[in-house]
Image: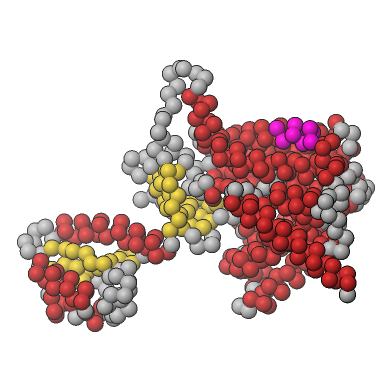
Amino acid sequence: MHTTALTLIELGAILLFLGVLGRLAGRIGLSPIPLYLLGGLFFGQGGFLELDGVMEFSEVAGEIGVILLLLLLGLEYTAKELVTGMRQSWMAGIVDLVLNFTPGALVAVILGWGPVAALVMGGVTYISSSGIAAKVMSDLGRLGNRETPTVLAILVFEDLAMAVYLPVLTAVLAGLSFAGGLGTVGVSLLVVTLVLVVALRWGNAVSAVVDSKDREVFLLTLIGAALLVAGVASALQVSAAVGAFLLGIAISGATAENAARLLEPLRDLFAAIFFVVFGLNTDPASIPPVLGVALLLALVTTATKIATGWWAARRQGIGRLGRARAGTALVARGEFSIVIAGLAVASGSVIPEIAALATTYVLIMAVLGPVLARIAEPAMELLERFPRRGPRAVPVA
Amino acid sequence: MNVIETRLPGIGVRREIVTGSGRRVGIVAQRDGELDLIISKANDPDACVASIPLTPDEAATIGSLLGSRQLVAQLTEEHRDLPGVSTRQFYIDHGSPFDGRTLGDTRMRSRSGASLVAVLRSGQVQASPAPDFTLAGGDLLVVVGTSEGLDTAADILRNG
């Protein structure tokens, strides 16, 4: 009885605190993710307040948060969008992967954290936050811009790359042998292809199975299906999150839109808990030692993301300002970097400093990304006006 | 007219045209139903000078306004050789006497001699609507007649 009361009080206090933080974030036009992480650091292990009563529930809730994050990501895209996006942007996608995976992986190797940690850190620095990027572009009124489809195509590629990366990561973290790892990768590639084909051909049938006019029935069917698929995927060592992502892709059309609308508040709740749990499990005292590395990594991967966007936009014949906008829109890292780091830390097969480094890195990037996206245009105009006094005329509004 | 359609994965669809002056003008239809009117910048054609969120009502009205001018101009041109006949457009306000009533209810032809040739709604043209056509607030009516007839028609539509 007492423990239940304690759990409720602690959970209530945390959520209330998150609400206040979210309001603050909204007021200053910031993504709430870094604030949630800070909230988690504030409480919990080594923080100002240790909360033990709430941990058991929060761990499961955090897991559900990851599943919902990926399910909604899958719902965002139709299989057709993924396939055409892949076809149009695979080159930019590969440039993105090489430029942004390498710095993270290199840092892990240089610090002597081993190859598994390199795989984790590469993922952390590779994946942009599609949530933050989409919000920034929409807030800044850039949906009509020519470079926007280029940026979105890269984000789509990254999300699809996650569907391959996460199973690989899960296999490696579980300490499977090389052959065993190859096996799960093979299985997951097969499943991804299968789901895409099913979604393209019989997407309506899948949607019809989960669809219902009754909101309650619809909600239960959706969550039930998502958790079941995630659980089975997890048991097959193919990563729970990817199972949910693929289910999201298989659901299409009006069903997907209704599902997204219905699940959004749940996702926000559980994902917030996930970020807090990640913060709770990270000892704030472990941050100062990795701060220097995190800053360096932030600097380098900001440059590599801008280079990626710049290059991809230039290939589409977009001007210098547009290229700068495309590059800076990609800079923000967020939810998925934390998902990757969370998987790694939970498995216990990497050194715990990874949590501190990933937290610090995401804290920097989630704040820096939107700021850079906002100042990209004035900064470019300033750059263009200053140096060359040549024949290259810059049109001035 | 060449409408360029671009899919924006996870967001919606963008449909735009490039005007003679080289500007892109279009609509971003977001999946949650929001419509944004976009107009490209003159000095940076990749970017937009404005991205204006529109409610379905507002979008429909703008569509009618843009479409009607062209239609009226065309009709005026066609009636140029018929002295005494002119074309005028009337807007049905929300809550006006014929909002939600049929065209037959107005008895416009018998009372004024003017004829309704088209109704513009949501940017779509309904040519030669039948008497059982139901009018609605926001509709733009294109009426042809003599100038006295058109004055009478205006009075009918305003006061019932």
**In the figure, residue A375 lies in which quadrant?**
top right
- Tell which of B122 and A129 is nearer to you: A129
The picture places residue A252, in percent across and down from the top left corner, at: 62, 64
State the quadrant of the N terminus of chain A: bottom right
- Tell which of A305 and A140 is nearer to you: A140
Q: How many labels does the image show?
A: 0
Instruction: Tell me if residue A7 is in the magenta stretch.
Output: no
On screen, residue A171 versus residue A227, left or right, reads right
Q: Which residue is drawn at 21% across and 73% down?
A: B158
Instruction: Tell me if residue A292 is in the magenta stretch.
Output: yes
Q: In this view, does A143 lie above or below B157?
A: above
Q: Residue at x 28, y 80 (%)?
A: B102
**In the figure, residue A57 lies in which quadrant?**
bottom right
Residue B80, visible in the rendered structure: yes
Q: In this view, does B82 lie above or below B103?
A: above
The picture places residue A359, in percent across and down from the top left corner, at: 78, 45
Q: Is residue A116 above or below residue A216?
A: above
- The magenta stretch is A291-299
Q: Is residue A328 above or below residue B82?
A: above
Q: Residue at x 72, y 58 (%)?
A: A17
